[in-house]
Amino acid sequence: MEKKLKRTKYAEERLVDLTLCIKRDKKFVFECTLNFRWGASAHIENDDYDFAAGLSKLLDVLDQKVKKENDKMQEKK
């Protein structure tokens, strides 16, 4: 899991915090809340029967959110 989270290492300077919650019922439910240093926040939710696939999908969406927020901030400057 740590190896997969290293994919978001580049966003470290843009984030105040990242909260990741993983629940398991019949399938894995991944919830992630991001708080950016400029006051924006984002909530991502994903579910999957396979842990690795679900986490990978979540990190893909997280990566897109960070890039989108970063682009918004670059446009405002």
Image (spheres, rainbow, N blue to C red):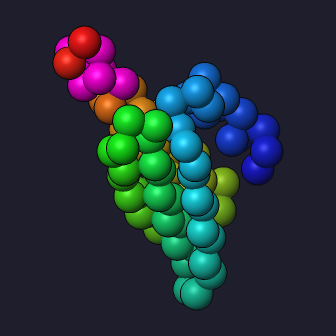
Q: Position of residue 38 (x, y in %)?
A: 38, 36
The answer to if 71 sits in the magenta stretch is: yes
Count of marks overlaid on the render: 0
In this view, which residue lies farthest toward the bottom?
25
Taking 8 as reference, is 2 above or below it? below
Say which of 31 and 34 sits in front: 34
Q: Along the horizontal axis of the image, is 26 left or right of 60?
A: right
Say which of 46 and 68 sits in front: 68
Q: Position of residue 41 (x, y in %)?
A: 37, 50
Q: Position of residue 62 (x, y in %)?
A: 46, 42
From which residue to which does the magenta span run? 70-75
Taking 61 as reference, is 30 above or below it? below
**Residue at 65 percent of width and 62 percent of height:** 51
Q: Quadrant of the C terminus?
A: top left
**Residue at 29 percent of width and 23 percent of height:** 73
Say which of 1 and 77 sits in front: 77
The answer to if 47 sits in the magenta stretch is: no
**Residue at 32 percent of width and 32 percent of height:** 69
Q: Along the horizontal axis of the image, is 46 left or right of 55?
A: left
Does the image show residue 61?
yes
Q: Along the horizontal axis of the image, is 63 left or right of 42?
A: right
Give the overall secondary structure of the magenta segment: helix
Taking 31 as reference, is 36 above or below it? above
Q: Position of residue 6 (x, y in %)?
A: 71, 33
**Residue at 53 percent of width and 38 percent of height:** 15
In this view, which residue lies farthest toward the right?
2
Answer with the quarter of the image where residue 19 lies.
Answer: bottom right
Does the image show residue 48?
no
